[in-house]
Image (spheres, rainbow, N blue to C red):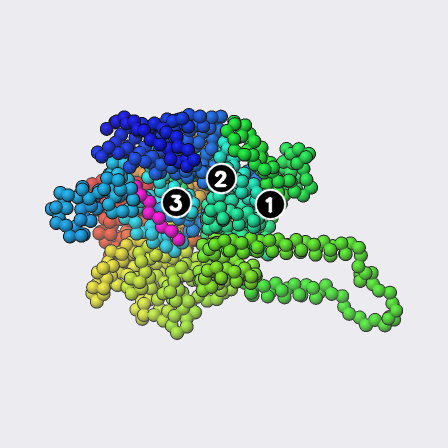
C-alpha cells in the first residue's frame, strides 16, 4: 500500500532554538498504517532540506537506504533504528568519499591502513598465522527461523490463565498502540519481522571462545552438512553486531550499490579521495602513535572522531598508542570512551600487543622474525579453514612482520628513506624528531577545510612513515627463528654447554712456570686500548637504551591494567601470564595476577610440547607400568595428547599398549572404550591412525585370543550375543567406524597393487632400456593389469614415492620416460572400455608412438616445472603411510570388499587376477561401489548377467 502523508513537526534536537519543519512520507505501510517496507521520507525547513529513501520498519529507517542533505551531500549504506550501522559511503559536495563502517555519524572502521609497515603484529599475513588465529576467531553459523510459528500474545494470555478460545479471539487487543520496548513481551516484534523479512530470514548464532578441540564437535552437531559457517570480521562485539545486521539485510543489496567487499577488504583505491571524517579518523590513528595528546583530544572532542575507530586490520587508536608507548594518549582515549579490550583482526588486544613488545625487547627478537618466532611450528599438511570469510578478502603477504614488509638490502633501505624525506621541506626536517603538527583548525563550513585537514594528515603520515621505516625495516632473516614458546630441551642445552666449554679449554695456552722477575713488563694484551674503552662505553649505552625501552613498555602495560584491561582475554599468541613468565618480569606477573589473571590456568600447548620433547629423546611410549603404557593412558585421559603420539615418528602405532595384548586399533574397537568417545573424535582419530601407519591388516590380539586382523576382531565383537544389548544403541556408529577402516584398508590394498605393478614394469624396462619403449612392451606380460589399474599421473606419484628409496633405478630419466610411454599406451587401450581411444588389438604405429611421446614430454615438463617453481615443502615430522614400498604379500591375502582373510573357496577376479572375494555377496557389493575395482563391468556381465549394466565412473588418464 502506497500513501502520501504530510506532517508538521518541530525539530527538538537543538536545545537552544527550535526550527519548525515539514515532513512527508511516500511509500509502503503495514495494516496499522506504520511505515514498513520501501519508501521515501522528506524533511524541509529553514535549517535544512533532507530526505531518506530506502527500507523502513516500525516507523524507523532500517535496512539499506540513502540519506541526502541538499547542501552537504549524501550517505548510502545500512541503517538500523534511524542511524547508520554498517558498511557505507558518505559523499560531500566536493565529491569526496568517507568510506568504511559507520555507527551513526562516526566512522568505526576504515577501508585504509598505513602503507608503511604496521607497528602492530599482523598474524593474518601468512597461511601459518591464519591457521593459528583461526581457533581464536568467533564463528558465526547461518540458520533459518520461521517467523510467526508461535503467537507470543496467545502464549502470554494462556500463561496467565486465559481461556484458550478467548485468547485466540482477543489476543490482538493485548498489544498497546505505541509499544516501542523491543524486549517487552507486549511489543509485536514478530509481526514487524514477518512483514519485513517475508516470513523467513537468516540469523547468525555466535559460537565464541572456540579452540581446535571443540570446533570439530560444533560442526558435527550441526543439523545439515550444507550449513553455512562464517568467521566474524572481528571478535569485537560491535563488529559482530554489524556483521549480523549486514548479513540479515544482504538480500536488499543491489550490485550497483555500496561495494561492501571493497570496504571490508581495504581496497580504498576503488573510491574517490577521502573526505573530512575519514581524514580525521586516519589522523587520529597516526597521532595516537606519535603521542600528540592535544591533537588526539581535539580530534575526539571537537571533530567528533570515534575513539574506537579501526584501520582495515582492526587496529584501534589505543593499539597505536600502545605500540608507541604513549601513556598519556592511552589515558585520554580510555576516558573518551575507547574500549581497552577491543580485538584486532589477529585476535590481539592492546594488552596482548604490549606483552608481545615487552617479550621481544627482553629476548632481543627483531621485528623481521617476529612472526616466525611467535607462531608455532606448522602442521603438515596445513589443515583447511573450518569456515569462510564473508565479503572480505584478507590477502596473504610476506613472512615478515607486516604485509608491506619485504626483503630489503641496506642500499634499498637508504633509497627508500631518502625518497620519503625528500617529500618534506627543509623546515620540516629534524635530526631526531619532527615537530608536532600544528593545532587542528576549527571546524568550518568552507570547502577549503578538506585540504587543510589533508595537510595536517600528510604531515603526521610523513613523520609516522619515517619513524616506522627506520624502526622496522631491516635485513631479511637468513635462518629460521626458534619458536618463542617452545619448551627448552635441557639435554640439548647441557650438551651444547659442554661442547662450548671443551672448545674454550682447547683454545687456552699451556701453563708454564715462568722464572721471570716481578719487574717484567706487562703484556700488550693486558693493556686497554682506546678502542676497547669506546666499545665498552657503547655496549653500556646500548644496554641502557634496552633497559629504558623495557621500562617504557612496562609502564604502558601498567597503564592498560589500571584502565581496565582484562588479562584473561589475551589469547594470541599466548596467554598474558605465560608471556610475562617467559619475559622474567616479577612486576608484570604481580600486576597481571592482581587484575584477574588465573594462576592455575592449564597450558595444553605446553603439555603437548613436553610429550613431544620426551618422544624426540627416545622415551618409549609403549613401556608399561602396572600393565598400562603412556599411549594407553593418553587414550583414556586425553585424545589431544594421543594425537601427539600418533604424529611422532618415534611411535610404533602397531605396538602392544597394555597387559591385555591390545594395540591402538584393537582398543579403539573395544566396546567399553568405543562408547567413551564421541563420533567426531572417534572418526578423526581413526583416520589419523590409518594415515600415519596403523595397519588394520596385521595380526592382533585381545587378551589371549589372536585374530588375523582388526576386522576379524571387530566382526566378532559386533556379533557377540553377550554384547548385543550393550551395542544396540551404538550399532550404527560401530558399523560406520568399521566401514571407515575398511575403506582405508581397501585404499592401501589398491595402492600396494599399483606399486607392485609399477616396480615389476620398471625392472623389465631397466633390463631392456637400450630398446625403444614399443619394443620393451613386447617383453611385458601383464599389459591388461597395467592398463586397468595404473594411470600416467598415478604412475608419476608412485615414481616419486619409490624415488625416496635407495634404489638408483628410480633416478634414471630414461626409465621414467619409457615407463610413462608404456603406461599411457596401455591406458589408452584398456582404460574406460566405453570410451577407449584404441582397440584391444591395436599396435604401436608411428602416429600413435609420436602422439604418446608428445603427451609424455608435455607431462614431464609440467611435472618438473611445477616442482621447480613450487614453494619448498615443509618438513614432515612423520610422513603418511606408503604401501607402495611394502613387500609383505601375505597380509593382503584378504577379501577385496570385507577385508576378512580368504578361505579355500575364495573367488579370484578372472580379468586382472590381482584381487579376490570371499563370496559372491561381497563381489556384488564391490561391483556396485563406484570407482573402486576397474574390472567391475566384466565381473558383472559374467556373474550377474541379469542385473543392469553398470557405468563405472573412473577418471581418465
Q: Which mark is residue 9?
A: none
Q: Residue at x 48, y 66 (%)?
A: 619
Q: Residue at x 51, y 55 (%)?
A: 562
**Magenta stretch mostly in which secondary structure?**
strand
Q: Determine which residue is flagged by label 1.
A: 472
The mark nearer the N terminus, 3 or 1, is: 3
Q: Determine which residue is flagged by label 2.
A: 305
Q: Secondary structure at mark 3?
A: helix
Q: Position of residue 458 (x, y in %)?
A: 58, 34
Is 877 drawn above or below residue 240 in the view shown?
below
Instruction: Classify 10 Å Cα crowding around label 1: few (below 14), some (14-19), many (20 and above).
Output: some
Report the Cα–Cα distance between label 1 and label 2. 28 Å
Q: Position of residue 713 (x, y in %)?
A: 29, 63
Q: Determine which residue is flagged by label 3.
A: 240
Q: Residue at x 32, y 29 (%)?
A: 8
Which residues are the magenta region? 202-209
Extreme residue in the front direction: 17
Mark 3, mark 2: which one is toward the viewer? 2
Q: Secondary structure at mark 1?
A: helix
Q: Is residue 632 visible?
A: yes
Residue 828's image quarter? top left
175 and 329: which is toward the camera: 175
Report the Cα–Cα distance between label 3 and label 1. 32 Å
Asked if the residue at tag 1 contacts the one at tag 3, i.e. Cβ–Cβ closer than 8 Å, the answer is: no
Q: Is residue 935 visible?
A: no
Extreme residue in the left direction: 165
Mark 3, mark 1: which one is toward the viewer? 3
Residue 604's image quarter? bottom left
Residue 204 on the magenta span: yes
Quadrant where the C terminus is found in the figure = top left
Q: Secondary structure at mark 2?
A: loop
Is 92 drawn above or below residue 167 in the view shown?
above
Amino acid at each position: 500500500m502506497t500513501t502520501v502523508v504530510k506532517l508538521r513537526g518541530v525539530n527538538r534536537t537543538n536545545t537552544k532554538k527550535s526550527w519548525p519543519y515539514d515532513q512527508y512520507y511516500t511509500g509502503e505501510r503495514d495494516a496499522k498504517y506504520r511505515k514498513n517496507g520501501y519508501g521515501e521520507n522528506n524533511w524541509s525547513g529553514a535549517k535544512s532540506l533532507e530526505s531518506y529513501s530506502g527500507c523502513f520498519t516500525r516507523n524507523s529507517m532500517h535496512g539499506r537506504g540513502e540519506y541526502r542533505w541538499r547542501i552537504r551531500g549524501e550517505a548510502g549504506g545500512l541503517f538500523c533504528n534511524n542511524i547508520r550501522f554498517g558498511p557505507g559511503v558518505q559523499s560531500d559536495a566536493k565529491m569526496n568519499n568517507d568510506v568504511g563502517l559507520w555507527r551513526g555519524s562516526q566512522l568505526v572502521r576504515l577501508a585504509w591502513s598505513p602503507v608503511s609497515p604496521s607497528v602492530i603484529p599482523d598474524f593474518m599475513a601468512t597461511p601459518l598465522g591464519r591457521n593459528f588465529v583461526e581457533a581464536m576467531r568467533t564463528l558465526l553459523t547461518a540458520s533459518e527461523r520461521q517467523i510467526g510459528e508461535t503467537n507470543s500474545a496467545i502464549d502470554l494470555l494462556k500463561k496467565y490463565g486465559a481461556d484458550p478460545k478467548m485468547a485466540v479471539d482477543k489476543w490482538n487487543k493485548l498489544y498497546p498502540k505505541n509499544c516501542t520496548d523491543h524486549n517487552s513481551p507486549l511489543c509485536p516484534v514478530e509481526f514487524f519481522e514477518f512483514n519485513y523479512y517475508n516470513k523467513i530470514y537468516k540469523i547468525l548464532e555466535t559460537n565464541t571462545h572456540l579452540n581446535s578441540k571443540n570446533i570439530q564437535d560444533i560442526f558435527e552437531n550441526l543439523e545439515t552438512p550444507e550449513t553455512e559457517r562464517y568467521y566474524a570480521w572481528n571478535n569485537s562485539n560491535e563488529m559482530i553486531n554489524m556483521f549480523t545486521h549486514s548479513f540479515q539485510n544482504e538480500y536488499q543489496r543491489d550490485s550497483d550499490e555500496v561495494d561492501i567487499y571493497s570496504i571490508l577488504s581495504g581496497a580504498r583505491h576503488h573510491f574517490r579521495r577521502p573526505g573530512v571524517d575519514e581524514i580525521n579518523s586516519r589522523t587520529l590513528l597516526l597521532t595516537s602513535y606519535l603521542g600528540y595528546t592535544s591533537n588526539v583530544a581535539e580530534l575526539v572532542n571537537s571533530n567528533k572522531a570515534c575513539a574506537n575507530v579501526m584501520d582495515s586490520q582492526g587496529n584501534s587508536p589505543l593499539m597505536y598508542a600502545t605500540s608507541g608507548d604513549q601513556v598519556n594518549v592511552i589515558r585520554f582515549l580510555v576516558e573518551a570512551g575507547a574500549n581497552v579490550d577491543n580485538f584486532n583482526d589477529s585476535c590481539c588486544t592492546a594488552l596482548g600487543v604490549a606483552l608481545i613488545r615487552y617479550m621481544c625487547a627482553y629476548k632481543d627478537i627483531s621485528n623481521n622474525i617476529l612472526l616466525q618466532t611467535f607462531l608455532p611450528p606448522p602442521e603438515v599438511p596445513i589443515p583447511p579453514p573450518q569456515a569462510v570469510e564473508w565479503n572480505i578478502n584478507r590477502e596473504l603477504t610476506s613472512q615478515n612482520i607486516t604485509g608491506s614488509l619485504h626483503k630489503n638490502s641496506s642500499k634499498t633501505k637508504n633509497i627508500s628513506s631518502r625518497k620519503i624525506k625528500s617529500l618534506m621541506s627543509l623546515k620540516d626536517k629534524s635530526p631526531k624528531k619532527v615537530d608536532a603538527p600544528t593545532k587542528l583548525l576549527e571546524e568550518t563550513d568552507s570547502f577549503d577545510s578538506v585540504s587543510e585537514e589533508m595537510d595536517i594528515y600528510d604531515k603526521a603520515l610523513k613523520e609516522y612513515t619515517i619513524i616506522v621505516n627506520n624502526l622496522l625495516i631491516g635485513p631479511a632473516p637468513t635462518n629460521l627463528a626458534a619458536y618463542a614458546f617452545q619448551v627448552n630441551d635441557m639435554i640439548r642445552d647441557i650438551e651444547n654447554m659442554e661442547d662450548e666449554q671443551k672448545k674454550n679449554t682447547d683454545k687456552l695456552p699451556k701453563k708454564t712456570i715462568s722464572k721471570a722477575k716481578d719487574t717484567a713488563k706487562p703484556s700488550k694484551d693486558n693493556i686497554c686500548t682506546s678502542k676497547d674503552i669506546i666499545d665498552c662505553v657503547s655496549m653500556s649505552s646500548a644496554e641502557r637504551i634496552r633497559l629504558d625501552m623495557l621500562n617504557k613498555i612496562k609502564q604502558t602495560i601498567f597503564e592498560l591494567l589500571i584502565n581496565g584491561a582484562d588479562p584473561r582475554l589475551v589469547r594470541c599468541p599466548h596467554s598474558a601470564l605465560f608471556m610475562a613468565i617467559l619475559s622474567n618480569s616479577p612486576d608484570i606477573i604481580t600486576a597481571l595476577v592482581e587484575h584477574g589473571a588465573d594462576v592455575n590456568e592449564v597450558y595444553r600447548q605446553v603439555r603437548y610440547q613436553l610429550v613431544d620433547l620426551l618422544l624426540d629423546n627416545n622415551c618409549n611410549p609403549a613401556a608399561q607400568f602396572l600393565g598400562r603404557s603412556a599411549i594407553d593412558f593418553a587414550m583414556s585421559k586425553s585424545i589431544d595428547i594421543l594425537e601427539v603420539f600418533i604424529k611422532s615418528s618415534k611411535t610404533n602405532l602397531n605396538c602392544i599398549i597394555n597387559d591385555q595384548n591390545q594395540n591402538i586399533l584393537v582398543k579403539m574397537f573395544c566396546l567399553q572404550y568405543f562408547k567413551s568417545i564421541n563420533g567426531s573424535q572417534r572418526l578423526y582419530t581413526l583416520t589419523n591412525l590409518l594415515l600415519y601407519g596403523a595397519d588394520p591388516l596385521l595380526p592382533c590380539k585381545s587378551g589371549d585370543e589372536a585374530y588375523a586382523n582388526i576386522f576379524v576382531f571387530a566382526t566378532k565383537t559386533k556379533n557377540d550375543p553377550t554384547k548385543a544389548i550393550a551395542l544396540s544403541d551404538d550399532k550404527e556408529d560401530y558399523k560406520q567406524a568399521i566401514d571407515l577402516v575398511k575403506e582405508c584398508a581397501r585404499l592401501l590394498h589398491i595402492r600396494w597393487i599399483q606399486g607392485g605393478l609399477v616396480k615389476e614394469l620398471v625392472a623389465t624396462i631397466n633390463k631392456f632400456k637400450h630398446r625403444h619403449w614399443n619394443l620393451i612392451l613386447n617383453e611385458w606380460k601383464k599389459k591388461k593389469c597395467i592398463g586397468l589399474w595404473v594411470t600416467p599421473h598415478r604412475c608419476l606419484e608412485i615414481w616419486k614415492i619409490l624415488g625416496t628409496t635407495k634404489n638408483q633405478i628410480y633416478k634414471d630419466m630414461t626409465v621414467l620416460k619409457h615407463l610413462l610411454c608404456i603406461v599411457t599406451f596401455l591406458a589408452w587401450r584398456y582404460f574406460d572400455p566405453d570410451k577407449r581411444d584404441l582397440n584391444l588389438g591395436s599396435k604401436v604405429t608411428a602416429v600413435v608412438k609420436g602422439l604418446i611421446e608428445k603427451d609424455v614430454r608435455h607431462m614431464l615438463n609440467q611435472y618438473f616445472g611445477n616442482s621447480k617453481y613450487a614453494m619448498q615443502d615443509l618438513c614432515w615430522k612423520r610422513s603418511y603411510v606408503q604401501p607402495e614400498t611394502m613387500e609383505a604379500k601375505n597380509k593382503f591375502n584378504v577379501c577385496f570388499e570385507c577385508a576378512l582373510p580368504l578361505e579355500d573357496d575364495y573367488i579370484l577376479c578372472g580379468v586382472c587376477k590381482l584381487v579376490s572375494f570371499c563370496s559372491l555377496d561381497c563381489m556384488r557389493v564391490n561391483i556396485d561401489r563406484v570407482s573402486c575395482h576397474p574390472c567391475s563391468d566384466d565381473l558383472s556381465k559374467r556373474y550377474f548377467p541379469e542385473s543392469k549394466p553398470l557405468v563405472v565412473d573412473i577418471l581418465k588418464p
